[in-house]
Structures are given as C-alpha cells and as structure tokens.
C-alpha cells in the first residue's frame, strides 16, 4: 500500500519533471524530433533508510533517471531478492545480508572501474580503518570481508580487492543505546546498564534476531560474563549462554517490549514506556524533535555498526545497467551524501559530501564540534540550537569505536530456533 | 429430461466456488505441505525429502520432559489466549446480540446498532495498536486517572505489553464476529416459543437456558469458529500488545519466514492448521451446523 502510493506520487512528480526537463534542455527545437528519448526508469528496492522523495527528485533533475521506490523491511528485502530477482533493478541492502544473497546468484556485482569515486570511498569499507589509519572493530559481517567477489559471475567472496564489488557503499552508522537522561538522572557509560535491575520493566531491545542477539552480546561482554571470539559469529555454546542470560532477564521482567519498527522505538521512548533501549540515530532525533530529551549514548564498550550499499539484479543488462552505473555515480557525487550526513548517517565518499555541506554543518556532524549556528535537518526543520554538540562526537570518535558489525552467523538456523525459545520463555 | 439436467445444473452452480477453492486454497495448501518436507540452507529450498522442519520444531520435546519444549509452551500460550478471548467474546457477543434481537424492536435501529459494532475496524491495525499506548501506558490515561483518584500509588505496569493487553485488544476487535452470527440465529427464533415458555411458567433464566441458547447454538458455533481460527493464527495483535514478548504460533512461523527458512515455516504452518482443525472438529461435534441451518 505504502509502496504503491509512493510510486504513484513519484510517477506524477517525475512526469511533470520530465516535461520541464524536455522544455528546458532544448530538446524542443522547432523541427519534428520523432524519436522521443526512452524514459530512464530504475526500480529501486530497499528499506526506507535511503528512500527519500528529495533524493529521487534531485536525481531526476540531475540525471533524468526516474527512481521508482519499492519499500520493504530488511527481512522482506532479502526475501524478495531470493524469491523474485526480476522484480527490481537496483538493490539497496545491508552488507550482512550478502551472506544470503550472493550464494543465491540473484545479484550482480558492479565493476569498480566504472565507479568514478571508487578510490575516494572511505577506507572504513575498503581497509577496515579510519582515514587517519586507525583500525576499527572487525567482528561480525564487516563490509571489507564481503566487499569483493572473485569474478563477475562468482558467488565466492574474494579475500583481496578485485574489480567486482558486491555492494557499492552508500550509508552506514554506529548504533548504540538510546536513553532518557531526564528519567535516568545519572551518567550511563556501559552496555551492562541495559540489564541493570534499576531499569526493570523499562528496557527494550531490537526484535530482529540477528541484530538483537548482538546487542545482547555487547551486554554479556560488558557485564564480564563471557568474552566472545566474534560476537557476530557465535558458537552454539555461546548462543546458548547469551540466550540464557537474556531469558533470565526477560523472566524477571527486565524488558518492557521488543521493537521492530522505527516508529515503535520512537513511541516507546517518547511515551516513557522505556528509558533505555537499542535504537537508531534518526529515531533519537525524532524523539528529540518531539521535545522529549533523548540521548544516543556513547558507551565504553563501543558501537554496533551497520552499512549498506548498491548492487543490481541479475536480470539487469544493456541500457538499464548503464543507467544503474549513472545513478550510483550520481549518488556518490555529493548531494545525496550531504543529505544523508544531515540525517545523522555517514556517507561513503566523504570528500564529495563535504563539498556539498556548509563548513558549520560539517563541523557539527563530522568533527564533533559545537554548532556555531542552528542545525537544520534535510527538510529544513530545526534539529539542534547553536552550541549543541553531536552525541558521541566526531566521525573518528564514533566510527573508530565500532566493536562489531551487524551479521549473519554460520549458526543462524540454530540461533533462530533459540530466539523462538527465548520469546516463548 | 429434467432428472438428467438437475445434477449438471447443481455442478454448474457449485463450479465457480469449487474452482476458486481448488486454485487458491487446495493447491497452495498442497504446496505448503510439500515444502514442509523439503530441506533448506541459508538462501534456498532444496527439494529433497526430509523431516528436518518437523524434527527441529519438536526439538527437545522428549529431552526436556517433564519441562515443556518451545512448541508446547507456545501452543499452550496460544490456546490459553484463544480460550480467554473466545469466552469473553462469547459472553459479550451473546449479550449484545440478545439486546439487539429482543430489546431493540425497530429494524432500522437494529441495523444502525450492528454497524456501530464495526467501529473497531474503521482504523488500520497499526493505528489501533499505537492508540493503546496513550490509554494503557505507564503515563497513560487510565494510570493517570487511577493515580489521581488515589486508587493506586504507582502506575500499573500490567495494563500494557501483557496478556491482559493482548486479550483486551483481541476481544475489542473480534466480539463483532460473535455478535453477527448469534444475532442472525436469534432473530429467526419464533417469538411464540418464548411466549409459550412464559405461559408454561418458565422463569426468564429457564427460557434463556432451555429455549434461546439451544436455538441460537448454530450462531454460537459459527461465531466461535470465526474467533478461534483468527486468534489461533494471529501474531500481529499478540506481538504489538504483548510487546513481542508473548509467544504465538503465528509468531514462530514469522520468525522462520524472516530467516528465509521456508520449509521450517511451512512445517509450523501445517502443525498450526492441524491443531486448529482439531479444535474446529471438536466444536462441530457439539452441533451439526448443516442440520441446524
């Protein structure tokens, strides 16, 4: 329903846009120009994270490519790629789902040589380090582990860089716990606080099993009960231990609810049903914009990070493939990057995004400095007053403290069964 | 001549429905049953016969005795919620239907009042769910009211994200499915039977138990079938109102589906279908609906 509406709206708008473009570009020159240009349309499958109307509008104006969004939840995107590869052209998905998508053979890698800014993509993706050379956490499905394929038609991840890139990175972030400072009234510095009895009945975690269990693992490690070799790839014994600790907490009434949807997390926090929970950066912003104090709290054990990017369906070839490259190149050329940065995410090519942001914006979002003027969101609405600093500070402070990445485990099947057991307990 | 044509006409009449039923119910169902015996890996189904989907589902059921394994716990919870919702919707639905059938005499008003019962369906599921938070939440209307009256010292936590909340939301939604068939049965009760019972010296209670309830039985059973089948398969309402912390048969299937484990999900679906079918069979043993209609 939502997707259908979006499409119709996008269609109407872009129809008008195309007409304007045709008039403006000098295509109407007085003599009969019979061969009308084929409309450039790309069906874009992804979650709502990157799918802004503003982005598709700007893209149409700059490149003439009409983006038709197909919006689904993370799980449904994966399901659709595996079962209906012909129903989309460009795929926007997270790196951790590649472990399921690549072996299915339903997606095609993009050629790094055709991506203009490829060499300017942040080393976070290509080398697992910050621009200043600091190494970052590599537990879980870190992007650089699944970034390259051995060949164009290969379904095997290459250990060294090749020309065949599974996903051209677009957006990523470092996730942590959101808290209500006005209700907690003391500093929170550790993931262990999620299971602190003080917050009994006022805590929440994410109800996506593969991500929820990693937040749980951060807590288990923080309380010193176990040190994981890789939180994103647990052994069966580790899954058992993690779920046992979480089950005890659940039975004791620690959790108010588990949330799955962006709006659910905003509602829980804004209404005070929870005071500490796993959260996403823009959800915290949303709560704050409702006038409710909420902090995306940096914690000493670090962040759980995620990243997403573009590839194409195996059904895409010829002109569509060229448009896809044109679209991806446009996406990395700066305007979209600046847009994402202003939402509190991070863009893959920092240099082009920086050129599209005002210096004070860059200083606030990326350098962790106090805002010298009011900070506005991409829609122009006021986000922060002058003088505010970003939770967690600079890009280097946040991305440099990533402890693990969203993941699909080798023991995924076992983990899912254990998750059902946890819910039933 | 006529005797030759009658069966043909009967087949023609039933034909379209049979076709739809076969294409959109029996065929997909056959696929689900088939897939439930397939194998799978991280990203695809493997069409080879295995009972893995079932074996995984019943994992630990013998080993954990006398404790309950995941699936038994889940079904126990689902059946319990189902029973509570059934009982409450029956009591409320019966009362409402009784009022509509015997106390409201104008046909217009009967229609208007029945339409009022559909109000819970006027908004989308999501909106309805979110709307409970300001009402039942920790800082919600009910808690603030009770605190203001001095009836409680601290907010009642069990109002929301609890079994209470789940049952409340389900009853609120599905009472309508009880009201309609029971009302339909009651409206067709010959009023002279009630008068006869009265003339024979029966008390109001006796009339209710010996005349009205037996005659309204088909409506009760049909309403019960509606409510039970819907609640057994529900996972959205149970999920949202239970804060995703209450297990349900539907939820188990959803978790499996989201992990792309289609055969395991299909096996769970077959089990759910079997359990629901058993309950419905038991119910129709009580009343032969075809005979009563």
Image (spheres, grey):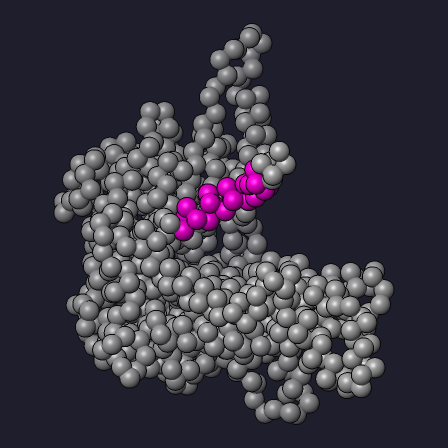
Q: Can residue A68 be seen in this snapshot?
A: yes
Majority secondary structure of magenta residues? helix
Judging depth in this view, the residue of A193 and A45 nearest the camera is: A45
Q: Where is residue A38 in the image (x, y as percent from the top left)?
A: 46, 21
Residue B189 located left or right of residue B53? right
Between B45 and A54, the residue placed more toward the observer is: B45
Please name whichever residue, A254 or B122, is drawn nearer the observer in this view of the structure: B122
Total numbered labels: 0
Q: In which quarter of the image is the C terminus of chain A?
A: bottom left
For this orientation, the residue located farthest to the top is A31
The correct choice, above or below, for B183 with respect to A329 in the image is below
- Asked if residue A332 can be seen in this view, the reply is no
Residue found farthest to the right: B106
Residue drawn where x is 56% and y is 89% of the image: B154
Image point 51% across, 37% down: which residue?
A57
Give the magenta range.
B7-29
Q: x%, y% of residue A99? A: 24, 51
Which residue reaches farthest left?
Answer: A160
Q: What's the residue at 52%, 76% (across, down)?
A: B83
Q: Residue at x 46, y 45 (%)?
A: B22
- Residue B289: horizontal and vertical position, in percent? 59, 63
Position of residue B276 relative to residue A170, above or below, is: below
Please tell me in which quadrant of the rendered image residue B76 appears: bottom left
Q: Nearer the viewer, residue B276 or A47?
A: B276
Magenta stretch: residue B30 in it?
no
Q: Residue A362 at what x, y percent from top left?
A: 41, 52
Asked whether residue B22 is drawn in magenta, I would say yes
């Amino acid at each position: 329903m939502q997707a259908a509406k979006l499409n119709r709206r996008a269609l109407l708008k872009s129809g008008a846009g195309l007409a304007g473009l045709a008039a403006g570009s000098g295509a109407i020159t007085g003599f009969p120009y019979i061969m009308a240009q084929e409309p450039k349309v790309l069906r874009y499958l992804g979650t709502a994270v990157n799918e802004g109307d503003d982005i598709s509008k700007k893209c149409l104006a700059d490149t003439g490519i009409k983006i038709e969004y197909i919006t689904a939840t993370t799980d449904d995107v994966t399901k659709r790629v595996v079962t209906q590869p012909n129903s989309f052209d460009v795929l926007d998905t997270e790196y951790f789902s590649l472990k399921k998508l690549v072996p299915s053979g339903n997606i095609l890698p993009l050629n790094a040589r055709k991506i203009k800014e490829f060499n300017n993509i942040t080393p976070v993706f290509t080398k697992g380090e910050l621009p200043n050379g600091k190494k970052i956490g590599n537990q879980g499905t870190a992007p650089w582990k699944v970034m390259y394929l051995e060949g164009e038609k290969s379904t095997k991840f290459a250990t060294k860089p090749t020309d065949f890139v599974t996903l051209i990175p677009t957006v990523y972030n470092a996730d942590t716990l959101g808290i209500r400072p006005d209700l907690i009234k003391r500093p929170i510095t550790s993931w262990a606080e999620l299971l602190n009895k003080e917050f009994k009945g006022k805590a929440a975690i994410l109800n996506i099993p593969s991500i929820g269990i990693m937040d749980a693992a951060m807590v288990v490690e923080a309380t010193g009960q176990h040190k994981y070799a890789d939180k994103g790839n647990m052994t069966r014994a580790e899954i058992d231990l993690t779920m046992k600790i979480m089950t005890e907490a659940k039975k004791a009434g620690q959790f108010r609810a588990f949330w799955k949807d962006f709006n659910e997390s905003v509602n829980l926090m804004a209404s005070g049903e929870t005071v500490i929970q796993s959260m996403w950066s823009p959800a915290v912003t949303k709560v704050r914009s409702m006038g409710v104090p909420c902090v995306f709290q940096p914690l000493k054990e670090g962040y759980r990070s995620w990243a997403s990017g573009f590839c194409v369906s195996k059904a895409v070839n010829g002109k569509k493939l060229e448009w896809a490259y044109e679209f991806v190149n446009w996406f990395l050329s700066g305007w979209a990057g600046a847009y994402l940065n202003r939402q509190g995410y991070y863009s893959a090519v920092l240099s082009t995004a920086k050129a599209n942001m005002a210096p004070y914006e860059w200083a606030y979002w990326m350098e962790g400095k106090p805002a010298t003027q009011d900070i506005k969101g991409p829609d122009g609405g006021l986000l922060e007053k002058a003088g505010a600093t970003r939770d967690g500070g600079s890009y280097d402070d946040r991305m440099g403290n990533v402890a693990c990445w969203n993941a699909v485990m080798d023991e995924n099947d076992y983990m899912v069964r254990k998750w059902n057991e946890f819910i039933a307990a | 001549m006529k005797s030759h044509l009658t069966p043909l006409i009967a087949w023609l009449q039933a034909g379209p429905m049979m076709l739809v039923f076969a294409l959109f119910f029996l065929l997909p169902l056959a696929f689900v049953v088939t897939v439930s015996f397939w194998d799978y890996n991280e990203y695809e189904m493997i069409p080879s016969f295995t009972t893995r989907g079932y074996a995984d589902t019943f994992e630990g059921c013998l080993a954990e005795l006398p404790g309950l394994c995941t699936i038994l716990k889940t079904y126990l919870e689902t059946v319990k919620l189902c029973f509570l919702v059934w009982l409450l919707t029956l009591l409320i639905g019966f009362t409402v239907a009784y009022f509509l059938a015997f106390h409201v005499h104008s046909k217009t008003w009967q229609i208007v009042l029945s339409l009022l019962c559909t109000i819970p369906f006027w908004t989308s599921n999501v909106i309805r769910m979110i709307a409970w938070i300001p009402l039942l939440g920790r800082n919600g209307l009910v808690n603030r009211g009770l605190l203001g009256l001095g009836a409680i010292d601290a907010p009642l936590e069990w109002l929301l994200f609890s079994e209470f909340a789940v049952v409340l939301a389900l009853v609120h939604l599905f009472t309508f499915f009880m009201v309609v068939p029971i009302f339909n049965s009651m409206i067709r009760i010959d009023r002279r039977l009630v008068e006869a019972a009265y003339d024979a010296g029966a008390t109001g209670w006796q009339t209710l138990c010996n005349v009205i309830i037996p005659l309204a039985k088909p409506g009760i059973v049909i309403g019960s079938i509606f409510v039970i089948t819907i609640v057994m398969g529900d996972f959205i309402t149970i999920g949202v109102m239970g804060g995703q912390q209450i297990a349900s048969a539907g939820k188990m299937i959803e978790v499996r589906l989201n992990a792309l484990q289609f055969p395991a999900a299909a096996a769970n679906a077959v089990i759910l279908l079997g359990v629901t079918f058993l309950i419905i069979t038991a119910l129709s043993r009580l009343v032969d609906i075809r005979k009563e209609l």
